[in-house]
Structures are given as C-alpha cells and as structure tokens.
C-alpha cells in the first residue's frame, strides 16, 4: 500500500493531511493502537525536521510498505537554498560550525540541508564529525551525484556505540540517541540524493 503524496511547505501546510494518511495506513494495515501511535510519532518527528529547514523548500511526504514487510515514511525534498542563503539562516560559531544542531532531529536537518545545496556533501560533512560517522563509504564523482545514499542512522548508531568508551563526547552522543524519539522508534533512517532531489526514508518493521 502507498498513501497519497502530501505536499508540505515551510508554513506547515500539509502536516495535518499526512497525519490523516498515517491513520488510514495504520487502519488498512491492521496496526494495533500502539503501532498506530508509533507511526504517527514518526510522522510527527519527520515533519518537525521539515519545519526547521532553512529557507524555502517543497516537500512531498507519503507512507508505503515494501516486500520486506517494512513501513517507510518517505520525504522527497527540493529547495532553491544555496551556500549563501544557508549562511544567512544559521547561527554560525567562530569555527564555522552550526552550534544550534542539537538532537538527532537537528543533525538530520543539517544533513538534508547539506545535500540540498548540491555541492560536495562528503566534504561538508567532514567538519561535522558526528554526522560523518553515519556517512556512506561509497565514493561518488560529480557525474554520479544523481542517485546515491549519503547517510544512515544505523551506521551512525554503530559508530557512536563503538567509540563510547573512548570519549565523553561519544557517550553524550549515545545519550542523545537514547533520548531521541525518532532514533528509538525507527529501525533506520536513510538520506540520499535521487535525481537532484533529497530523499529521507524512515523505516520501521511493525
């Protein structure tokens, strides 16, 4: 099953409709009340990330299942934001890093914004060491930039967990993951570029 594709804009128009679609999807899929609420919470977290993107954007959001039995919340995002526009929206510290990127939702937003600039995403993410920990290992040249994955939550979790004993910073990052609604509910979150659109796929097997 796949729900209708709902358009969401920076003003939050469309959010109520995607919540309605989540309710219909849960009913069609015979989810119990607990799983229906989990699906709704994942949709709320996804749309919260959208609402905090810098600048103007256009997003399509829908819910679908696949042959593996997973439920996917799919966000397809476009924007006219570029490096200069981003700089005007963000509160940048003297090191050039965005100090407002708190929480998993903030990190997801940053990755999406990097990708929306259609520049060298990998190069940008190296300045954000915790984001880089979830980055894809695939090397892509400029001609291949139309269809590839750049980050996943499962890789990020594994990397942070592996370094927890080495530094308080990684322990704090793990605590952040444990307190995050979306990180606890989702089985994985994958962010990639598809035909110059940024896709975020939030996966959950109910």
Image: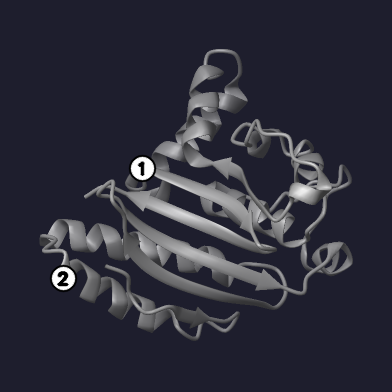
* Residue placed under numbered mark 2 in the picture: 28
**Quadrant position of residue 173:** top right
Crowd class of label 1 (few under 14; some 14 to 19; many from 20; radius 10 Å): some
Q: On the rendered image, what quadrant is the N terminus found in?
A: bottom left
What is the quadrant of residue 123 in the picture?
Answer: top right
Q: Which residue corresponds to mark 1?
A: 187
Q: What is the CA distance from the residue labelled 1 to the residue labelled 2?
A: 21 Å
Residue drawn 82% across and 54% down?
119
Task: Please give left or right for residue 142 compared with residue 158 in the image.
Answer: right
Q: Residue drawn at (83%, 49%), measured in percent from left and top?
A: 93
In terms of secondary structure, where does tag 2 sit? Answer: helix
Seen from this angle, which residue lies furthest top? Answer: 166
For mark 2, does the 10 Å Cα neighbourhood hold few (<14), some (14 to 19), or many (20 or more) residues? few
Task: From the top left corner, tell me how far across and down residue 35 is, in percent.
Answer: 19, 57
Compared to 9, does 63 lie above or below? above
Picture coordinates of residue 197, whole percent (x, y): 65, 65
Q: Extreme front residue here?
A: 143
Q: Is residue 137 left or right of residue 16?
A: right
Q: Report x, y in % for residue 37.
A: 22, 62
Q: Which mark is residue 168?
A: none
Q: Position of residue 186 (x, y in %)?
A: 36, 47
């Amino acid at each position: 099953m796949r729900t209708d594709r709902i358009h969401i804009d920076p003003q939050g128009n469309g959010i109520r409709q995607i919540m309605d679609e989540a309710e219909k999807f849960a009913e069609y899929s015979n989810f119990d009340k607990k799983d229906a609420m989990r699906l709704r919470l994942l949709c709320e977290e996804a749309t919260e990330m959208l609402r905090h993107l810098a600048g103007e954007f256009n997003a399509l959001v829908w819910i679908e299942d696949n042959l593996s039995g997973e439920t996917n919340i799919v966000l397809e995002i476009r924007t006219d934001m570029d490096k200069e526009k981003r700089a005007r929206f963000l509160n940048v510290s003297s090191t050039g890093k965005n100090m407002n990127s708190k929480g998993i939702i903030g990190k997801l937003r940053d990755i999406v914004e990097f990708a929306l600039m259609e520049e060298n995403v990998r190069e940008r993410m190296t300045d954000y060491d915790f984001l880089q920990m979830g980055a894809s290992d695939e090397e892509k040249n400029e001609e291949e930039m139309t269809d590839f994955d750049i980050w996943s939550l499962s890789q990020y979790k594994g990397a942070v967990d592996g370094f927890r004993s080495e530094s308080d910073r990684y322990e704090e990052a793990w605590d952040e993951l444990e307190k995050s609604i979306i990180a606890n509910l989702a089985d994985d979150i994958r962010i990639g570029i598809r035909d110059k659109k940024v896709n975020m796929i939030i996966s959950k097997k109910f």
